[in-house]
Image (spheres, rainbow, N blue to C red):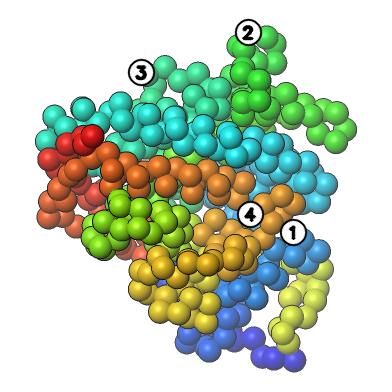
Amino acid sequence: MATTPADRSPESTLAFLREGYRFISTRCERYGSDVFTARLLLEPTIFLRGRDAVELFYDQERFRRAGAAPKRGQRTLTGKGGVQGLDGAAHHDRKAMFMSIMTPSAVQRLGRLFADEWRTRLPGWEGSGTVVLHEAVGPLLMRAVCAWAGVPLPEAEVGRRTAQMQAMIDGPAALGPRHWRGRLARRRAERWIADLVERVRIGTLPAPAGSALAVIAEHRDGAGRLLPRRVAAVELINVLRPTVAVDRYVVFAALALHDHPAWRERVRTGDEPTEWFVQEVRRYYPFFPVAFARVRRSFEWQGHHFPKGRRVLLDLYGTNHHPQLWPEPERFRPERFAGWRDDPYGLVPQGGGSHLGGHRCAGEWITIELMKQAVGLLTGAMDYQVPPQDLALDLGQAPTLPPSGFVLSDVRPTG
């Protein structure tokens, strides 16, 4: 049996929070192993990275999600009772509910709604002097996804509801006020959405057939029961919140266009597929750092022992930068996706494995479509300048963004 390297620190939580995206990879390189153990949140934990580790991690016979994620994440990012923490038949049923919403035509419709919102706001950006892209794009995504999902959203509430989604995204790994803002935002958003669900069920709020609001409000589990109204709210927020989170990828796409101007021209003229560029943005830039699971029953893997009940963390960012999987991983090279075969265990910015029966993010196709729309708009619908600003990414903060939020100036719509 192999000796699994063990981190020497008696408790690694503060180091994990301080080092962020680099915590796991730094130790994997230190120990020369893609598996090591450490204490996290006061309990022994196994850390993994790499393609083989992803394939192992998404084996539902060996791992479960129930009880895996820390409570602070449930109280901010995911909510309690949602699909991320389910296993077995309950997970398959709930995941099928989500996948029924994610048809190709529905995904394309959301992309069009987002693009229309962007074009509608462009004249206002032209006259505003400067535009902070992260601040501008979040409300566009919120309006678009609510219209798409059948969720009524008065214009006066757009800012408040967008801020609630962003606070939930920002809260899981934060300490102090940012974390507490995420918890408060979660409670308020769940009350808002639970009220809408209840109104749909009693017939006072019509929901468009096939919309996320209708599908989730009317969904019945394997026993024929409606979801509890608060769980239904959690699941509808699991549609809204990840869509708003794409504002970070839009900023990263703008940053990549700025840092690699040759690719801006190649995308604009259509000389290279926009999807190559989008996929490389997803691989290269930091989104969510890790995924959580627990060992279902004890087993051995590559000589390493996985005891029953042990918490396991998969390094998403580190896998997307693994040198054995991605040659020159610290170089931004969209052409690496020429001829890319969609490997469910290779590119994992939003998790790995199967979309249908597994725990891979159901909204991944939405993310790609929205990013393609954003890249097309940034390169073909507008001209702008990028004034001097702080665009450095702090990999010790998760999730991270450029401190400036990516400021644009001299915005001008083009034909």
Upstream in the sequence, badge 1 or badge 4?
1
Residue type indicated by callout 2: Thr
Q: CA distance from mark 1 to mark 4?
A: 14 Å
Q: Which residue, given by chain and number where applicable, does mark 3 sit on?
A: 156
Q: Residue shown at 53%/22% (left/top)? A: 151
Residue 338, x across and y down, in percent: 48, 67
Upstream in the sequence, badge 1 or badge 3?
1
Mark carried by residue 360: 4
Residue type indicated by callout 4: Arg
Query: Is 38 situated left or right of 399 in this image?
Result: right
Check the image and report above or below for 396 versus 374: below
Residue type indicated by callout 1: Arg
- Dividing the picture into quarters, in which one does residue 412 lie? top left
Marks 4 and 2 in Cβ contact (< 8 Å): no
Mark carried by residue 64: 1
Q: Which residue, given by chain and number where applicable, does mark 2 sit on?
A: 204
Q: Residue shown at 46%/36% (left/top)? A: 111
Query: Is 11 situated left or right of 205 in this image?
Result: left
